Image (spheres, rainbow, N blue to C red):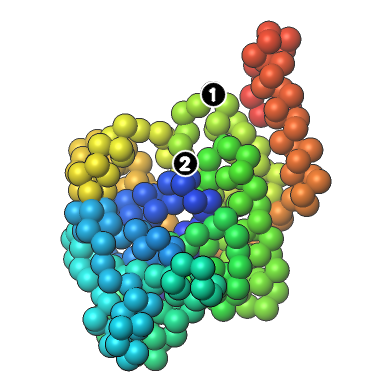
Amino acid sequence: MAKAIKQIAIYGKGGIGKSTTTSNLTAALAEMGLKVMQFGCDPKSDSTNTLRNGKYIPTVLDTLREKHAVKAQEVIFQGFNGIYCVEAGGPAPGVGCAGRGIITAVELFRQQKVFEELDLDVVIYDVLGDVVCGGFAVPIREGIAEHVFTVSSSDFMSIYASNNLFKGISKYSKSGGALLGGVIANSMGSPYSKEIIDDFVDQTQTKIMEYVPRSITVTQSELQGKTTIEAAPQSAQADVYRSLAKKIAAHTESYAPKPLEIAELREWAGKWGDYLLALEQGKVVAQGATI
């Protein structure tokens, strides 16, 4: 009987720290002794950089444009602790769907039975979550990913992107699509960031997988072209990523979230905005998430 491979997708708004979180998660899973592949699905093709000392790798789409026929091993590169790194890539600027790289790369790897050949334990898809278009929705829509996690801060546009992702998961879950594992709360540190994200999770009937604090250690590590797990293994931040990795490795139960309608989301955000303004002006006493 073939070994069951855990396939998960990490989504999040561009610039929210999705790839940073994903790479540190991947590094922590590899540190646990698991055989892991990180599958970068962003057209920028920079998902796996910090697993390979800041170096870019040839993408699946770029290689296909040059050769027209590609063996999967030509676009798989090893990084920190033996992690397999792949970048799907995207179309030429201004031409085609940005999600095409995911569709093409996934089909290539399926045909060549790459995951089974490498005897992988975990495959992590790092997916842009600003817009859940046809290409970017592939890991959800086709059930390629077993579990989906979203990286979100307490900023409105990040929460907005996560809520849109929840809508996609809810829709495709009815036809065998992937389900939500939970929210990775990133960049925690600003006043009330934890209370805001906790309230959003409560409103959408989801759950927090881990609170990841904002840390200069992450910036220092990335300037070296490395993950925090590699560059600062003894740091408190590295231990946060290890805690997240243990939770995700043990995760088995995912579900369909309850996204807010746009009017509900804006009303919810407005209440928080009014509350924080009143707090700043000294008109109310801090009550946290009791609003």
Relative placement, left or right, of 173 versus 262 is left
Residue holding disc 1: 191
**Image coords of residue 84 (percent x, y):** 26, 69
**Image coords of residue 216 (percent x, y):** 31, 32
Is residue 274 visible to the viewer in this orientation of the structure? yes
Q: Are marks 1 and 2 in contact (CB under 8 Å)?
A: no
Residue 78 figure quarter: bottom left
Is residue 1 visible to the viewer in this orientation of the structure? no
Q: Residue at horizontal 36%, vertical 82%?
A: 65
Secondary structure under the numbered disc 2 in the rendered image: strand
Distance between the Cα atoms at labels 1 and 2?
A: 14 Å
Q: Amino acid at mark 1?
A: Pro
Q: Amino acid at mark 2?
A: Asn
Q: Residue at horizontal 60%, vertical 52%?
A: 162
Q: Residue at horizontal 28%, vertical 71%?
A: 58
Q: 44 or 23: nearer the eye?
A: 44
Quarter occupied by the N terminus: bottom left
Q: Is residue 157 above or below residue 46?
A: above
Residue holding disc 2: 186
Quarter occupied by the C terminus: top right
Residue 157 figure quarter: top right
**Label of residue 285 in the image:** none
User: What crowding class fits label 1: few (fewer than 14 Cα within 10 Å), some (14-19), or many (20 or more)?
Assistant: few
**Image coords of residue 31 (percent x, y):** 23, 56
**Image coords of residue 249 (percent x, y):** 38, 60
Q: 128 or 8: nearer the eye?
A: 128
